[in-house]
Image (cartoon, grey):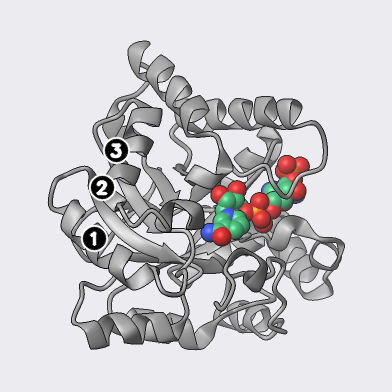
Amino acid sequence: MKKLKLSNGVMMPVQMMGTSVWDRKGSVRVLFEKMSRSVRHCVTNQLAGLDTGRDYNNEEQLGAIFQDILKNGVCKREDIFITTKVGNGQQRNKNMNDEINKSLCNFKLDFVDLWLLHWPLPEYWIDNWAQMCEIQKSGKIRAIGIANCRERHIETIMKEGLQMPHVIQVEHHPFRTTEELLELCSKHHIQVEAYSSNCLMLPFVKNNDVLNKIALNHNKTVAQVIMRWHIQHGVIPIFSSFSIEHINDNVNVFDFELSKEEMKNIFNLNNDYKFHPESLNCPGY
Ligand SMILES: NC(=O)c1ccc[n+]([C@@H]2O[C@H](COP(=O)([O-])OP(=O)(O)OC[C@H]3O[C@@H](n4cnc5c(N)ncnc54)[C@H](OP(=O)(O)O)[C@@H]3O)[C@@H](O)[C@H]2O)c1
């Protein structure tokens, strides 16, 4: 698993796999079984880090998988990079220490690698962020960040004189390239992580002419071209997949390189498409 260095020196995988089942159709029980199979494959073969959140309702299930894998000596704790998030409901409790303790208890682990605010919840997020900065010193978390973060949140942190996030996680893919945000993050040494990094492989993505032409050029799939595009411009893609074949494809992207022109052509696909409606999850966002 290739890694890059965050601003505090923590090494983070260049690719992450997500574990949310909420955008999938079907019985929750079956979806959780499929997700477990993907997680086992990913962790056992050290293919990518893992992304979850308290609101995904799977911390305990993931914890059981980690304990099993660690007990059997398949890999060591430091080989698994785990991100979790504090959801809006938990943020309203205003006690971040309780929340990290609950997550650690669910995972049966001593620390998580990356802990994110799931949303910058108006009236709550900045005080909770200040608490997270303090908690980090306890060793329960190796790095902290904010998901669904915009330029204005970074500016607020600066104004308040608080510590900058090590990572922000936003919807980012060839149809939403968030270039101003990338620029601001680069200025402040904040690592950007892309969720829905394959833009859920929606039909307009799968059938896009530009992506298909580039894929053909390199004898790769459209998903591999998208993964490579993220990694080549320094963003960590979080993909999700219930298919072992797709997972293997998504991580098999280090034997080719996109040209400057191909990179530019992919950036030019941007039309600010957003799959995840923000205001539903975070009123006032
Ligand atoms: N912070 C937030 O608010 C937030 C919001 C959304 C998501 N996330 C995180 O980001 C993760 C990923 O998001 P996402 O599920 O939208 O990711 P995604 O990878 O863009 O979309 C997943 C879809 O793409 C398909 N897919 C993946 N790899 C493929 C491949 N190589 N070939 C063909 N199809 C492929 C999957 O189908 P198959 O199963 O058939 O492969 C699935 O239908 C989530 O699990 C979660 O951890 C965070």
Task: Give yes or no for contact between labels 3 and 2 (Cβ–Cβ under 8 Å).
Answer: yes
Q: Position of residue 227 (x, y in %)?
A: 59, 59
Residues packed near mark 1 inside 10 Å, few (<14), some (14 to 19) or many (20 plus): some
Task: Give yes or no for contact between labels 3 and 1 (Cβ–Cβ under 8 Å).
Answer: no
Q: Is residue 149 left or right of residue 239?
A: left
Given residues 241 and 250, the one toward you in this image is 241
Q: Is residue 134 left or right of residue 99?
A: left
Label 3 vs 1, first from the N-terminus: 3
Q: Is residue 84 left or right of residue 223?
A: left
Residue placed farthest to the top in the image? 72
Q: Position of residue 135 (x, y in %)?
A: 19, 52
Q: Amino acid at mark 1?
A: Gln
* Measured Cα–Cα span from mark 2 to mark 1: 8 Å
Task: Give yes or no for contact between labels 2 and 1 (Cβ–Cβ under 8 Å).
Answer: yes
Label 2: state its secondary structure.
helix
Given residues 26 and 215, the one toward you in this image is 26
Residue that appears at 24% across and 32% down: 110
Residue 229 sits in quarter: bottom right
Q: Amino acid at mark 3?
A: Asn
Can you say which quadrant of the picture contains the C terminus? bottom right
Q: Position of residue 18 (x, y in %)?
A: 56, 46
Q: Which residue is mark 2?
A: 97
Q: Is residue 119 above or below residue 25?
A: below
Q: Which residue is mark 1?
A: 131
Disc marking residue 101: 3
Q: Position of residue 35 (x, y in %)?
A: 63, 32
